[in-house]
Amino acid sequence: MSAKHHITLFDVKCILDPPAWSPNTWRTRFVLNYKRLSYHTEWIAYPDIGNVLSSAGVPPTRSTAPLYTVPAIIDEMAYIGAIGMDVIINMAFMVMPNTVNILEGRELEYYVVGKKEMFGIGVEDMFPADKQDAMWTNLKEGLNRLSKLIESVKHGNGFLFGTTPTYADFVLCSQFIWFEKAGPKGGWEKIKEWNNGKWAGLYESLKYGKSHSFREEPMVRAYSLQLIFMKQQQYTRKAEDTKTDTSRAA
Ligand SMILES: N[C@@H](CCC(=O)N[C@@H](CS)C(=O)NCC(=O)O)C(=O)O
């Protein structure tokens, strides 16, 4: 099982092989190809366009029948933006003060000094006793929002936005592993109970699922936290611009 591409292009199928024939959809395909964006095409039978698009959370383009038309695209990056805003930001200052427990010597010193330089606040002040309840509440509310977003997209059992894992699943699960390994003691145990075990389910699916993607070795690709925050802001701005997690062309 491989992760889906970041962008899904919805197109209408026919009996040709390959089936791409619609001029409306070709415009979008040309743009995706020209920009060398990674996408996969979901082929829809003509009579099913409305059902498939509305189930996927795509808004209608017309006010009279047919309400839903292709092309439509879903950009997974909008989901990653939501994970950034609802989860990563809320977790960061809860995890960093505890990360000092898994570092020692010059690594610890480097980490503490580096974080102070990066965020302008010492790790010891990031998760103060008098703010901990509020910070837990923020995280819980963020995960509630993410849960609602996930539920708003109709999909089969398994992963966040589909029956196969996407990059968004890997991003979110990575945050949970971070919280479990480096975050407040017992913190992941708390999250596992929230939202009817949804997050625990995702973690287990990636750990034991057919994707075999959960291994203890560090990922080859590493982002600095700063880069993550910059990306978050970028995606949030993008999400705010579109005001929706779906967008369309034509
Ligand atoms: N993108 C234009 C039109 C696109 C369009 O007409 N697409 C056709 C396929 S080529 C379609 O989806 N038709 C749906 C239907 O007839 O049920 C719009 O949304 O107004």
Image (cartoon, rainbow, N blue to C red):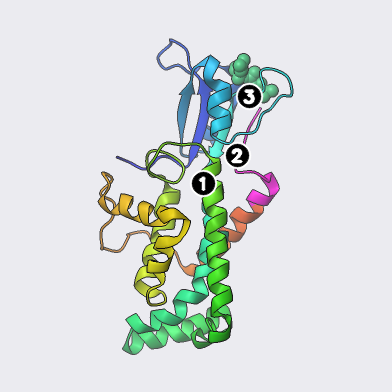
The answer for how far apart the CA atoms under marks 2 and 1 are is 13 Å
The residue closer to the viewer here, 193 or 72, is 193
* Front disc: 2 or 1: 1
> Can residue 175 be seen in this snapshot?
no
Quadrant position of residue 245: top right
* Proximity of marks 3 and 1: CB atoms separated by less than 8 Å: no
In the rendered structure, the answer to whether residue 206 lies left or right of residue 249 reads: left
Determine if the C-beta at disc 3 is less than 8 A from ligand 1: yes
Q: Amino acid at mark 2?
A: Thr
Residue found 68% across the figure and 27% down from its top: 61
Q: Name the quadrant of the C terminus.
A: top right
Residue 68 numbered tag: 3
- Ligand 1: image quarter: top right
Q: Which residues are magenta?
A: 238-250
88 lies above or below 54: below
Q: Amino acid at mark 3?
A: Tyr
Magenta-colored stretch includes residue 201: no
The answer for how far apart the CA atoms under marks 3 and 1 are is 21 Å
Which residue position holds label 2? 246
161 lies above or below 176: above
Q: Name the quadrant of the N terminus.
A: top left
